[in-house]
Image (cartoon, rainbow, N blue to C red):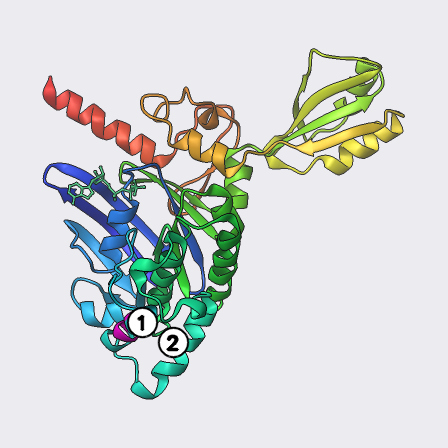
Amino acid sequence: MIEVKNLTKKYGEHLAVDNLSFTVDKGQILGFLGPNGAGKSTTMNILTGYISATDGTVLIDGHDIFEEPEEAKKSIGYLPEIPPLYQDMTVREYLNFVADIKQVKKSEKATMLTQIMGMTKIADVSERLIKQLSKGYKQRVGLAQSIVGFPDVLILDEPTVGLDPMQIIEIRDLIKELSKKHTIILSSHILSEISAICDRVMIINKGRLLVSDTPDNLSKHIGGSNGLHLKVKGEKDVIKKALGNIDDIAKIDFDSSEADGFVKFTAYSAEDKDIREKVFYALSDARCPIMDMKSTSMSLEDIFLEVTKTEPEAKTAKNPVFKKRQKVINQNNVEQKMDNETVKIPVVQEMEQREEKQDAGNL
Ligand SMILES: Nc1ncnc2c1ncn2[C@@H]1O[C@H](COP(=O)(O)OP(=O)(O)OP(=O)(O)O)[C@@H](O)[C@H]1O
């Protein structure tokens, strides 16, 4: 549905988007994450034909946004970071105006606008001037204008910014509902929101793609969910012996704090195997009851902070995220198996190689 290849944008000498490639399938919700200045809005502005690219291609539903802008734009609804609202129009006048621009058939217009105002819960302010609306309502009107014409693709730059928690939940549900018929790219700083509604997450920094995967896989692979935290009643030696027979366990780290006959430890599986059942039976046979067992995993927030850490830490293997024995998903979703050695995300390697070349050139 959306195909972006080697997208690059320079503002003068400043590289805002650096060779970005990704695809979004029909009906998917892609969450776009990155710190301030990462290049999210620039990418969205290019995807929607608002600004040109320095290099690369963007296909929307098979149409090149640069070669066939009219065709491509027909498939896009866009909510920019600052919604393009006419303050002196009423909500209804404005949405009528948008519908005309989008060439919605006259016979369908009234019904469509009533439906959209219902979906975005702005029917009660339809006759109010936009300038008199609260920020949250203005944001909903911005979202409403992007839906007018029911385009196949919706690109939403921070759709819930300025909304209160209740409204955020409503808009989140609306986006979920819209994804049944639309392909959606959204950017947000609210990570719980991205985890809750996106099928896939892309984290970019300084215009470059760092990781792209489902929220679950990100916390599994990058967070290293191959660890199992346990609190077990019994003697440490007995527990050690019982677990020693399980081949799938690569390593056990015992906590130094042992109290009241409980032992706490983390068991790491080899090759990301699910060891829960074997651990359960082994400890049960050894008559060491499990009081607590949970997988180690990182929240999207932890992952975001780790992968976007400022250089030099993030781009070197000093970052613990890259050190773990784990699989890392590269930008083409190809799994790379790493075994007890430094793991670098491909884009980080590329960055380092480029810098090495530059350094060599400067000598
Ligand atoms: N018109 C412009 N002229 C020059 N530089 C720009 C322009 N627009 C954006 N930039 C720069 O390009 C980089 C990417 O900006 P962009 O707005 O795309 O980031 P962003 O990820 O959307 O950030 P935020 O989360 O703060 O909105 C930033 O360094 C920004 O300063």
Question: As displayed, is residue 80 above or below residue 274?
Answer: below
Q: Amino acid at mark 1?
A: Leu
The residue indicated by pointer 2 is 113
Quarter of the image where ligand 1 sits: top left
User: Any magenta on residue 97?
Assistant: yes
As drawn, the label of residue 276 is: none
Q: Secondary structure at mark 1?
A: helix
Q: Which residues are magenta?
A: 94-98
User: Please, is residue 314 above or below residue 180 in the view?
Assistant: above
- The residue lying toward the viewer, choosing from 179 and 102, is 102
| Residue 342, x across and y down, in percent | 43, 24
Asked whether disc 2 touches disc 1, contact meaning CB atoms under 8 Å apart, the reply is yes
Image quadrant in which the N terminus is located: bottom left
Give coordinates of residue 290: x percent, y percent. Answer: 81, 29
Q: Which mark is residue 95?
A: 1
In this image, 186 relative to 281: left or right?
A: left
